[in-house]
Image: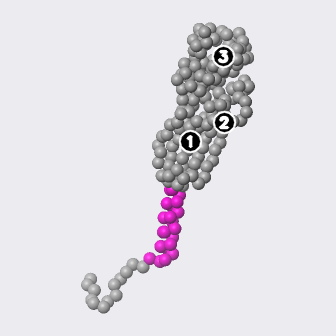
Amino acid sequence: MTLEYGQARRSWHIPRRMVRGLLLGGMGGLIAFSIWFGRFQSRSICFHCLQIQHTTQWQVPWTELTYWRSERTTPTPLSQAMAQAGLVTGTIHDWHFIQGSGNGTFCALGDGHHLLTPSQDPGLAHCLQAVAAHEPPGVVAEILRRLRDRDLIVPLTAYASDCPPEAVTNADRYHAWKQGRPIEWVLDLR
């Protein structure tokens, strides 16, 4: 169909309401995507009490500008054992980053990641309680020092991972379990 000079062309007419709706919907989708994508989640561990802190930071995407932050602290088997044995005093925390991801970061590791697995080990928690109940204070202090050392925690965890819960309250059961596992070798306390 040819148009003659002076004739009106047919044009598509899009109602203004539809244009506004599309623009608002697109902006809403962009904001929703930005909010979801700008979330950075991380975990930290306190070197003092060995509790885990879960943090969610809502940030402007691809920046470190945080506009909302939420935190919650959860106990670990090891932190509960330390509290029950009376080895934690005060409420001062020394948080060390374990790991985090989000807002363009796939996996960030921190200086506290070596404590995550041992803090969840019930055998290590039982061992710590049993040592606190049946060994001199110097041994307990050395174990606590080694718990926080990334190079020394591996042999300590291997030594303690199969400690039975009965060893905490029963000295005979603790010493029977301890035979064949020279704590002096693990701790170098000769």
Residue 42: x and y in percent read 56, 41
Badge 3 is on which residue? 139
- Residues 37 and 140: in front is 140
Q: Are marks 2 and 3 in contact (CB under 8 Å)?
A: no
Pointer 2 residue: 93
Q: Is residue 92 magenta?
A: no
Q: Main secondary structure of the magenta part?
A: helix
The mark that comes first in sequence, 3 or 1, is: 1
Q: Residues within 10 Å of mark 1 (few under 14, many from 20)?
A: some
Label of residue 129 in the image = none
The first of marks 2 and 3 along the sequence is: 2
* Image quarter of the N terminus: bottom left
Report how far apart the C-alphas of labels 3 and 1 lie in the structure: 33 Å
Q: Evaluate if marks 3 and 1 touch, with contact meaning CB atoms under 8 Å apart.
A: no
In the image, residue 36 sits, relative to residue 156, either above or below, namely below
Task: Please determine whether, in this image, residue 79 is positioned above or below residue 133.
Answer: below
The amino acid type found where label 1 is placed reads: Ser
Above/below status of 32 relative to 150: below
User: Do the residues bearing badges 2 and 1 touch, measured as CB atoms within 8 Å?
Assistant: no
Which residue in the protein does label 1 denote?
A: 42
Q: Which residues are magenta?
A: 14-34
Query: What residue is shown at x 34% (from left), y 84% (from top)?
Result: 9
